[in-house]
Amino acid sequence: MLSIPLPPEDRALSPYTGWTRAHWEAVADGLLAAVRPYAGPEHALIGLPGPRPSVSGTRSDGLEGFARTFLLAAFRVAGAGGADPDGLLPRYAEGLAAGTRTPTAERELTDRDPVSWPVVGERSQAMVEAASIALALRLTRRWLWDGLPAEVRERVADWLSGALRHTPVDNNWWLFPFTVGAFLAETGSLAEAGMDQDGAARAAVDRGLAKIEQWYLGGGWYTDGRPRAFDHYNGWAFHLYPVLHAHLTGDQQQLARYGGRLAEYLEGYARTFGGDGAPMHQGRSLIYRFAAAGPLWAGALSGRTPLAPGTTRRLASGALRHFLDRGALDAEGLLPLGWFGPYPPLVQEYSGPASPYWASKGFLGLLLPADHPVWTATEEPAPVERGDAVLGLPGPGWLVQSTAADGIVRLHNHGSDDQPADQVLPDDPLYARLGYSTVTGPAFRGGADNHFGLVAGGRVSDRGRIEPLGAGPGWAASAHRPAEGVTVTSLVLAAGAEEVHLHLVTGAAAGTEVRHTGWAVADRAVRTRAEAGPSAEVAAEGTGLRSTLRAVSGYTEAGTHQVPDGTVFGRAAALPALTGRTADGPSLFVSAARLSGARLPAESEAQAAFRIRLDGPAVAVAWADGSVHHALIGPGTVTVRREG
């Protein structure tokens, strides 16, 4: 499916992916060549085709096309020591001069002013793009910025400084003025023009770092502005910008602080990549695809990583290949709004046709010289390939469960809901599910996958605000309140590919219906079955992927449900479901679930390999490896102990 000419694979150096630095350079060149025909007059706006503009309008979308591809060009040229055989920098220099000539507040393109950029205003998309432009200029300063005419430098600095004078969205956006300020402070451009008497550039750097500090929860994890919002922005924003800044300035104190946090983050993050290279399918802005490789490269670039050089490259190249091998580029070589191909349900309203080029951050590794060990070391296996593992991440309230035989990574979510502090919004499918994985996507219509809720009037209750109750070796737990006076306390125990889910309902009227759903499997076609027991299974005919859900206690019926429109992984999708009713008093519902690939043992064999023993609110699960989980569950509280 790849339309970019590539050099031959090198399976001696890269036994897992076959890819080398030359492949990354070829892909970068191909991506940049594909957008070139869409550049407007004087290369100021790059208006890519797409199904719709973003909410910021077509002019902003054109700026986005310029800024995000400029960042990719900067990685390519700076990583080559300034070599620019394709003449990238002169074109972007021309665009800088034209775009800042008469900045405008108008959203749409007009005949009167067809090329100028929108000004940077309050919470404007232009602020985001200003950061990419500033970072690109910083990386290419000696080959581009220092050679620009003084009047152009002054205009560009003035346009960028709008990011210092206006307020960003109160989340990772504070790192955009931070990035602009870092460049302007380094060059002294505002001071030269008499526009920085109050030290606004350096103040923006200090302010950005101070703002993100309030969201740092330890263990390498930041919440993105809201109380419990964890996703890929941890890596490609919260860690990438401060670490890269510290690296570029040589500030060892900052590098120790932010690089140390990045290293902690990478310990868990590296385990979220599947054996097929897939990053975890969770959170917003997933159209940025292989930007997920950015924090991996940042660790290598800064020297703050727990990963061997060969592991870093295996993960990063695996992620890039995962998308390109599966049709992430269209016939023109462009990145559409989607995951592989186009997929509208995945796209947020702030995204426009050029938004996917935030994926440029995945090419950060090109800043590492060709003789760096990350490029010369033999690839080593990814964490998922080294053996089955379960890892609790207390910061985000996640349990990461992976199996080596099929390369699947599952993320059990008991801590991220993306709910604002002052209200409770409807569940977001990309944040509120009990589980996410590298091979499944959430259902956006027709009922929630990986969900437990109360049923009233044909509607299943939302999870709402999630209260994390902890995460540890092979377990994670949380509580939520689906209705006034009702608490659902949830616990997952896991080993190998097996999952045991416990949901304790307290405060609900006797006879209240509950519904628990499992993994939504998608492909060109899926097979379903439900049995007495009760249990249900969905199987993908093409990939052999299977999702099973079996009642252990409390549930009385099983079934399967089709997912309208499928998921991002296929047009045909279905999920297994269990239903039951509450008793008079606290009611415990227990099930066993499994998401497995074709290379794992049959589900019936796995059932025989572990045992579940219930004694009121206490449960003991004896796993096939000889370990045992002992758990006690009560309203809003759990205790878990693991033996062996």
Image: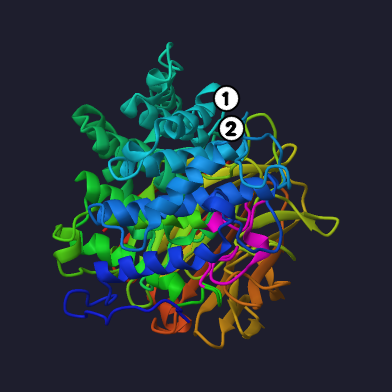
Residue 63 visible in the shown view: yes
What label does residue 120 carry, if any?
A: 2
Inspect the magenta stretch and tell me whether residue 179 lies in it.
no
SS class, disc 2: loop
Q: Position of residue 181 (x, y in %)?
A: 41, 28
Q: Taking 262 as reference, is 583 above or below it? A: below
Q: Tell whether label 1 touches label 2 (CB within 8 Å).
A: yes
Closer-to-camera residue (453/38)? 38
Q: Taking 439 as reference, is 285 above or below it? A: above
- Residue drawn at x 33%, y 39% is 147
Residue farthest along the top direction in this orientation: 198
Locate residue 496: give its quadrant. bottom left
- Residue drawn at x 68%, y 34% is 105
Residue bearing the label numbered 1: 166
Q: Position of residue 308 (x, y in %)?
A: 18, 58
- Residue drawn at x 48%, y 42% is 96
Residue 267 visible in the shown view: no
Locate residue 459: give its quadrant. bottom right
Amino acid tagged 2: Val
Residue farthest along the right direction in this orientation: 457
Along the polypeptide, which appears first: circle 2 or circle 1? 2
Closer-to-camera residue (267/506)? 267
Q: Which residues are magenta?
A: 333-356
Callout in the foreground (2, 1): 2
Residue farthest along the bottom direction in this orientation: 541
Left or right, residue 300 beside residue 543: left
Q: Taking 166 as reference, is 425 above or below it? A: below
